[in-house]
Image: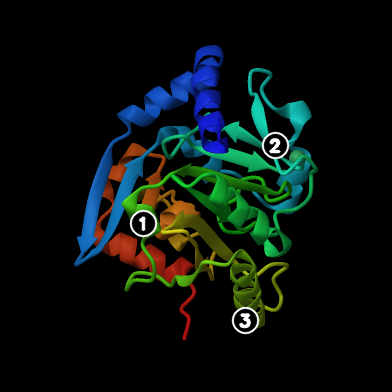
Amino acid sequence: MDFQEHINQLFIAQKKEWKQLRTGLEQLDNNKIKEFAWGDVSVTVQFNPSRIRSAAAKVDTENIEKRPCFLCAENRPKEQRGIPFLDKYIVLCNPYPILRNHLTIPLHSHVPQRIRKKIGDMLTLSELLPDYIVFYNGPKCGASAPDHFHLQAGLKEPVLIQGDNELRSCLTIETENKKEAEDRFEDVYQYLHTRQPDEEEPMMNIIAYRERNRYILNIYPRRAHRPKQYDEEGNKSLLISPGALDMAGLIITVREEDFNKIQSQDIEDIYSQVSMPII
Ligand SMILES: [Zn+2]
């Protein structure tokens, strides 16, 4: 049985033995969606109330240090089982899914969310999961556990593998050779570091996947953690905290009023605030 089949089997087993996951998957089936288009560019808005924990997560250092880390083994739900990856990660079913077969892949050790030396692991995982995208949210770019390194993955959808477009920036690395992908990522990383020298890590989201035997990395450079609408009140408020999926083209709303009122100009405005233009 290959790795991807192991993961499918894990989902089947966990669905039977873990009610929280079952509920999450039923919820995913009932999530409403709206679609927007700008020529060939498309954005899907998903109403997903189960993501409120993540969208409203307080990820400042003080709040993070106070809470028990939900990715550390001792704090995970007792029903949650996983499959080892590279001896240092465990692949887990995410009980609050945005995507089909939504996976969370934490390192065993509690170390901060930093991608620079782990891009190779991300590429390796994409190789083992050819039907999936593997994604990374930087510590100030959608990660709700910025203190515990983790990747995520889910089944591929066309909306998630759109490269650069007029709404937001995306730098794409595409190559047959993994080492070359890692080297080119390092160049991009260094360039982004020069743009944000004061950040511990240049702000970014990444989506990795395999297609036609090639490694593809879509890197979404960021200049803001959340759009100003996140902190507004009343009619101007939109509780949207973008991560990799939102940057790609799948925007998650956790409150029904936001889902109902969001318009194409809000989407354009949010992208223009959080995406960093690359000249
Ligand atoms: Zn932890």
How crowded is the residue under tag 2: few (<14 C-alpha within 10 Å), some, or many (20+)?
A: many
Which residue type carries mark 1?
Gly
Query: Is residue 242 in view?
Result: no
Q: Is residue 183 above or below residue 120?
A: below
Residue 195 in sight: yes
The reply to whether the residue tagged 2 has its Cβ within 8 angstroms of ligand 1 is yes
Residue 205, position as x, y percentages in the image: 54, 61
* Position of residue 55 measured from the top left corner of the image (x, y, whole percent): 51, 45
Q: CA distance from mark 2 to mark 1?
A: 26 Å
Task: Decide if residue 89 is on the left or right side of residue 174.
Answer: right
Question: Which image quadrant is residue 18 in?
Answer: top right
Q: Position of residue 138 (x, y in %)?
A: 61, 58
For label 3, the crowd category at 10 Å Cα-Cα, with few meaning under 14, some 14 to 19 and many 20 or more, is few
Residue that numbered label 1 is attached to:
249
Point out which mark residue 240 bears: none
The secondary element bearing badge 2 is classed as loop
Residue designated by label 2: 71
